[in-house]
């Protein structure tokens, strides 16, 4: 079954329970108001709570409570969907007095809607579900006008869930439906919690999430648990046993033992083992987030897992209970970091480097890993060209974008940032050396964003690389600061952390990728080429602008008294802008277009893309067909590099 369809199904519940699964932050009305003001004081554009921001906040708040629109009907919430000027002003006044009464009323209405829906679910259980329900029905839907319409929507959602699970795993469909019901009950029980202090923190958490989301698409509030998970995603590392789990109601099944992790090294824990207790504490029925918290811990400490293991087949199958003790250690998710290999060509070959994110920790970084792999290939082979694949790389650390770019230029401005006060700071590569100064192409798609766009556009600006792939990248040219330090030990502020958009970034040409993205020199379509994804399709993106170019770096952001001294060593051997070889580029474009037009399978692939259009689910399904099996985009990238090597006499 296609991955996207499965994700669409779980979206209905998991979209808005992420932070509810985590422990609520230790906040009250006063600290919430202070945090809102703190965030807005740092924002690139919005400095105070205005009627427009409050109106956005109300809409996001309602969407976050009921993303599938299967609890409220329009009449329940019309005063907040279409707020009057007086109501907007009332909310602002309340905010200035550390009060969020209107949002408390919305949560009270949600509690009533939950009780009403539970009664509807009882009625639905008495009738046969409809057939052939499609997930598209639940995309961009309006609020139900009547209770009958709401009942029909819930019924069809149940039918979609059952049909999906039947296709996915018919033997486990009932268990999976129970899992959905269990998660739904947890969400609903939180809203019905009788503890006033708990309900207040729940409301205020919603408020912080909605207000931050109303400022722009990248500003966000994180509960303490979410903040720690965010840093795991940035660093691609954690401390624990190195295993992926699945909640199977009767325990947590090991889906995968991560290579190189503590569990793999111990060789006792196996895939399909079912964890029923951690250090003697039963975990059956426990939320998976809480179970994972029990398993994770300090490096060097031990954790004992009680597991059920099935042995044998058929009538000889039996269950065995085992206690497995594992010493916790660091788990670095290298498969989510980078990939490197060498493809022979002529009397040498092409170095392929794929970077999935821009990361850094105490032991390694994206720059160090890429440099090490490239140096190794140069020692073992005659490298004729390099492909840097940044497809679907959504970014990471800004400093790593600078240093990765520095592997391919001598020295100079890589990225300039303009903050919320209009101050411009230039981030430079200073070491004066390159790891590779030969033919280079950077492969992008519409999922390449942020730090990957800095690298691609900077190398394009300097004329060091041709950019190839989708017609443009994602278009995220804004930068954010996060209140939890990447090098922190994982101890988050009990009041929560936040990420706030402070301004835009620009490469040495003065251009920002914001909204429009990095434009490819040679367009090679891939599976994302027809999708409407990117910054310009998000809610409330920042606009795009431009600053002056900085090839001849005047060090204007350096204190005047230090400029002359710094210029002595910095100005020597600055990376010069290399003029684009238009004749070469035109030949590469023509050759690529010819190959694509005469590749029958590639043409079928493109036809299928256009047929699927904007439907991500159908594209995901098509990737499971023969025509989507090959990575045509990458294959053509290698062809372009081979052409460049030949045409520049580098072979």
Image (tube, rainbow, N blue to C red):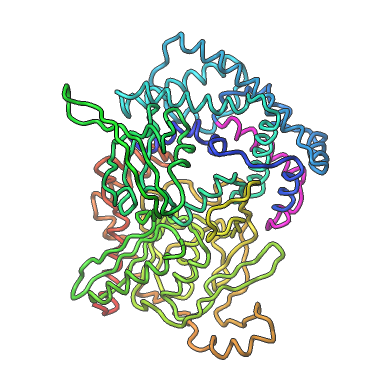
Can you tell which quarter of the image residue 417 is in? Answer: bottom right
Can you tell which quarter of the image residue 356 is in? Answer: bottom left
Q: At x 41% / y 55%, what residue is drawn? A: 445
Nearest the camera: 648 or 328? Answer: 328
Q: Is residue 111 visible?
A: yes
Q: How many marks?
A: 0
Q: Quarter of the image containing the C terminus?
A: bottom left
Asked if the magenta segment contains residue 189, the reply would be: no
Does 272 sit above or below residue 451?
above
Side of 366 relative to 637 (left or right): right
Does 178 sit above or below residue 439?
above
Q: At x 30% / y 63%, what residue is drawn? A: 340
Q: At x 17% / y 24%, what residue is drawn? A: 314
Does 560 sit above or below residue 621?
below
Q: Main secondary structure of the magenta part?
A: helix
Q: State which region is magenta.
A: 40-67
Side of 312 relative to 121 (left or right): left
Can you give x and y, in whole percent of width and height, for residue 333 in the image?
38, 54
Can you give x and y, in whole percent of width and height, for residue 108 in the image?
69, 25
Can you tell which quarter of the image residue 621 is in? Answer: top left
């Amino acid at each position: 079954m296609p991955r996207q369809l499965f994700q669409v199904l779980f979206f209905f519940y998991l979209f808005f329970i992420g932070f509810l699964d985590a422990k609520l932050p230790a906040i009250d009305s006063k600290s919430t108001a202070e945090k809102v003001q703190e965030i807005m004081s740092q924002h690139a554009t919005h400095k105070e709570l205005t009627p427009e921001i409050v109106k956005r906040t109300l809409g996001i708040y309602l969407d976050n409570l009921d993303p599938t629109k299967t609890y409220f009907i329009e009449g329940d919430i019309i005063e907040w969907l279409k707020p009057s000027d007086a109501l907007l002003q009332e909310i602002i006044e309340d905010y200035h007095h550390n009060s969020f009464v209107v949002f408390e009323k919305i949560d009270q209405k949600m509690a009533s809607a939950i009780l009403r829906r539970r009664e509807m679910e009882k009625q639905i259980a008495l009738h046969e579900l409809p057939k052939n329900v499609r997930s598209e029905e639940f995309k961009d839907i309006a609020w139900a006008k009547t209770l009958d319409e709401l009942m029909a929507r819930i019924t069809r959602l149940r039918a979609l869930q059952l049909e999906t699970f039947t296709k996915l795993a018919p033997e486990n469909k009932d268990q999976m439906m129970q899992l959905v019901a269990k998660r739904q009950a947890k969400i609903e029980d939180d809203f019905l919690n009788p503890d006033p202090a708990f309900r207040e923190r729940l409301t205020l958490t919603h408020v912080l999430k909605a207000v931050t989301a109303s400022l722009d698409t990248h500003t966000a509030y994180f509960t303490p648990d979410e903040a720690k998970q965010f840093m795991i995603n940035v660093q691609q590392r954690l401390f624990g046993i190195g295993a992926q789990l699945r909640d199977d109601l009767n325990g947590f099944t090991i889906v995968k033992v991560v290579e190189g992790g503590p569990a793999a090294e111990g060789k006792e824990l196996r895939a399909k083992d079912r964890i029923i207790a951690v250090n003697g504490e039963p975990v059956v029925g426990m939320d998976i987030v809480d179970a994972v918290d029990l398993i994770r811990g300090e490096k060097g400490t031990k954790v004992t897992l009680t597991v059920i293991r099935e042995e044998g087949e058929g009538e000889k199958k039996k269950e065995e209970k085992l206690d497995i003790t594992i010493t916790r250690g660091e788990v670095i998710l290298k498969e989510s970091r980078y990939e490197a290999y060498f493809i022979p060509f002529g009397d040498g070959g092409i170095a392929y480097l794929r970077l999935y994110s821009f990361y850094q920790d105490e032991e390694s970084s994206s720059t160090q890993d890429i440099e090490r792999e490239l140096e190794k290939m140069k020692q073992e082979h005659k490298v004729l060209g390099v492909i840097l694949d940044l497809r679907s790389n959504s970014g990471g650390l800004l400093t790593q974008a600078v240093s990765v770019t520095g592997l391919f230029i001598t020295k100079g401005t890589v990225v300039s940032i303009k903050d919320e006060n209009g101050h411009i700071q230039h981030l430079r590569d200073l070491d004066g050396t390159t790891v590779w100064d030969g033919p280079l192409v950077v492969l992008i798609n519409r999922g390449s964003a942020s730090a990957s766009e800095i690298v691609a556009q900077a190398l394009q600006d300097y004329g060091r690389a041709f950019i190839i792939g989708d017609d443009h990248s994602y278009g995220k040219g804004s930068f954010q600061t996060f209140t939890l330090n990447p090098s922190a030990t994982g101890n988050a502020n009990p009041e929560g952390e936040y990420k706030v958009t402070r301004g835009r970034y620009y490469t040495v040409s003065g251009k920002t990728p914001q909204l429009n993205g990095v434009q490819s020199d040679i367009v090679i379509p891939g599976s994302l080429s027809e999708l409407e994804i990117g910054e310009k399709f998000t809610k409330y993106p920042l606009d795009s602008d431009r600053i002056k170019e900085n090839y001849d770096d005047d060090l204007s952001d350096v204190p005047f008294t230090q400029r002359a001294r710094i210029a002595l060593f910095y100005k020597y051997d600055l990376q010069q802008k290399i003029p684009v070889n238009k004749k070469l580029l035109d030949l590469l474009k023509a050759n690529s277009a010819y190959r694509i037009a005469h590749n029958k399978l590639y043409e079928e692939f493109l036809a299928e893309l256009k047929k699927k259009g904007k439907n991500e689910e159908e594209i995901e399904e098509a990737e499971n067909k023969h025509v989507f099996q090959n990575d045509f985009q990458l294959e053509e990238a290698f062809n372009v590099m081979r052409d460049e090597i030949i045409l520049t006499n580098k072979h």
